[in-house]
Image: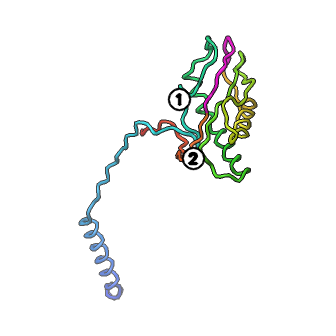
Amino acid sequence: MAQKIRNDFPLILFCLCFLGLLGFVLKNSPIQETKETKQEFTQIQSAIGFTRPFQLKDFWWIGENRWRDPKKFKTFVQARAIGLHYIFKDYCKKNKRKPRHEIFGIYMEISKQGKFENVMPAITSPNNKVLAQQIANYIEKYWRYTRAHGRDKVIVLIRFDVEQQPILELDVQSK
């Protein structure tokens, strides 16, 4: 037994030295205190793709009666603007054009059932007439809104701003 301990003594001494050194390093190592900092975001400019954020002045209501709330309609259009972004990108790719600033108005009627009817370009230039017609066809085919007691007529001013950062979040806030 004494012979075995004498043979294993260097190994036992090495293990004890290693454990002592490890304990010393852990005890004397600087502990970095990490504090979690929360960044306060009041509001990030909301945009979807190249579509500029809509404002209430971008909606021109035609007629005396408004059967739908303009603020809710603005939120509705802002949420659906991602589809407009993809039409714009596809249009630029098919026509081999660089994306540039575009602005035009789309006339639409919203029926009592919430279906978009008679959607057509209202304010265009010769440069963006095809794009405006594609946007109008998309709106008439895919958009639906809430029911109301009457028919609303509105012109929506749509702006594409190629310098706009594509932010896909709305009102990002920290938790």
Q: For the residues labelled 2 and 1, say whether their Cβ atoms are less than 8 Å apart.
A: no
- How far is mark 2 from mark 1, CA to CA? 18 Å
| Residue in view at x 53 percent, y 29 percent | 55
Left or right position of 8 against 139: left
Asked where in the image residue 30 lies, by quadrant, the reply is bottom left
Residue 14 colored in magenta in the image: no
**Which residue is nearer to you in this view: 94 or 129?**
129
Q: Residue furthest front?
A: 126
Secondary structure of the residue carrying tag 2 is loop
Circle 2: is it few (<14), some (14-19), or many (20+) Cα within 10 Å?
some
Disc on the earlier residue, 2 or 1: 1
Q: Position of residue 4 (x, y in %)?
A: 36, 86
| Residue in view at x 57 percent, y 21 percent | 70
Left or right position of 168 against 38: right
Q: Position of residue 156 (x, y in %)?
A: 62, 28
Return the mark for residue 55. Answer: 1
When the figure is inspected, residue 13 is found, relative to residue 144, above or below; the finding is below
Left or right position of 41 against 108: left
**Which residue is nearer to you in this view: 74 or 135?**
135
Secondary structure of the residue carrying tag 1 is loop
Q: Position of residue 121 (x, y in %)?
A: 70, 31
Q: Please report the bounds of the magenta region as a residue range.
A: 146-157
Q: Position of residue 117 (x, y in %)?
A: 74, 23
| Residue in view at x 56 percent, y 43 percent | 161
Question: How many badges with numbers are in the image?
Answer: 2
Q: Residue furthest left?
A: 28
Q: Which residue is mark 2?
A: 162
**Which residue is nearer to you in this view: 84 or 10?**
84
Quadrant of the snapshot with the N terminus: bottom left
Residue 155 colored in magenta in the image: yes
Residue type, mark 1 in image: Gln
